[in-house]
Amino acid sequence: MPKLEDLLEVAYKKERASSRRLAKNLALSAEDALRQTLQTAAGNQLLSELIANRKRQKADAVTKIALRKQLTTDARAYKRSATLPDPAAWLAWFDGASHPNPGKMGVGGVLRNPNGELIHISFAAGQGDSSEAEYLALIAVLQAALEVRPEKLVIYGDSRVVLDDVQAENGAAVLSHHRMRARQLIAQLTNLALIWIPRRKNSAADALSQQAVILPAICREQ
């Protein structure tokens, strides 16, 4: 039998008010009155099922609220980083594609120096899934950065999986090889920032990664 705290957790405001009136009119305990009110709302459904369903709905609502807050925070962080860049910093964008997923991988990246000059990276990367492709794109951008040794570098990517994994204390085991390689490169760079951006803000790197899938020949140009 459901406990009182379970009943109180899932009861709506109107149902609590109705149960109080029922308790007063029929001289019932608050628990019995609330139980009867919720059982009426459940209809042919078991009261335990009603409680379980409402708890799931509540959990889903909490998750959606948390997600909206996180997206708002990410958007604000991106706006600050995008509108107030250090004029002396190099900027980079990376993206990986896999068609189908898993399937043929393409790597894309852009490196821009403080004068606005661009280095484009685009090449096919064999077979794998989208997370592997994203990691390979990050590694390619890091390798390109090491060739010019920028004093400050800001790297943007739309893969939260890769950006979180490469900075995590214990990342995903299946990505450990790529994580190790990326960290080895990062360790050779000073003053580096990794920032997540929405995919729509990563169109240049995305186009280069898609191009690499369609045109598998290696094409890195400056």
Image (spheres, rainbow, N blue to C red):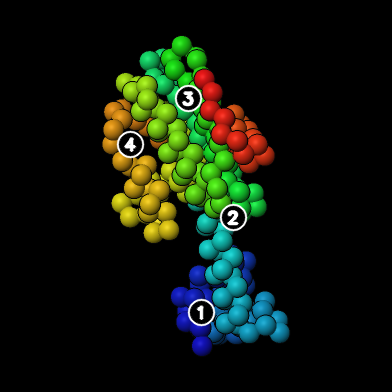
Which numbered disc, 4 or 2, marks the residue that appears first in the sequence? Answer: 2
Q: Amino acid at mark 4?
A: Ile
Percent x, y of residue 30: 51, 79
Residue ID for mark 2: 102
Q: Amino acid at mark 1?
A: Ala
- Please give the label number shown on residue 87: none
- Please give the label number shown on residue 111: 3
Q: Is residue 200 visible?
A: no
- In the image, is 211 to the left or to the right of 182? right
- In the image, is 149 to the left or to the right of 213? left
Residue 138 is drawn in which quadrant?
A: top left
Q: Check the image and name the residue furthest to the front.
A: 217
Q: Nearer the viewer, mark 3 or mark 1?
A: 3
What is the distance, in whole Å, between disc 4 and disc 1 at their CAs? 62 Å
Between 20 and 116, the one lying in front of the other is 116
Q: Is residue 74 above or below residue 57?
A: above
Q: Is residue 56 visible?
A: yes
Residue ID for mark 4: 186
Q: Residue at x 56, y 61 (%)?
A: 60
Q: Amino acid at mark 2?
A: Pro
What is the distance, in whole Å, between disc 4 and disc 2 at their CAs? 27 Å
Which numbered disc, 2 or 1, marks the residue that appears first in the sequence? Answer: 1
Percent x, y of residue 77: 46, 33
Which numbered disc, 4 or 3, marks the residue that appears first in the sequence? Answer: 3
Q: Is residue 78 above or below residue 57?
A: above
Residue ID for mark 1: 30
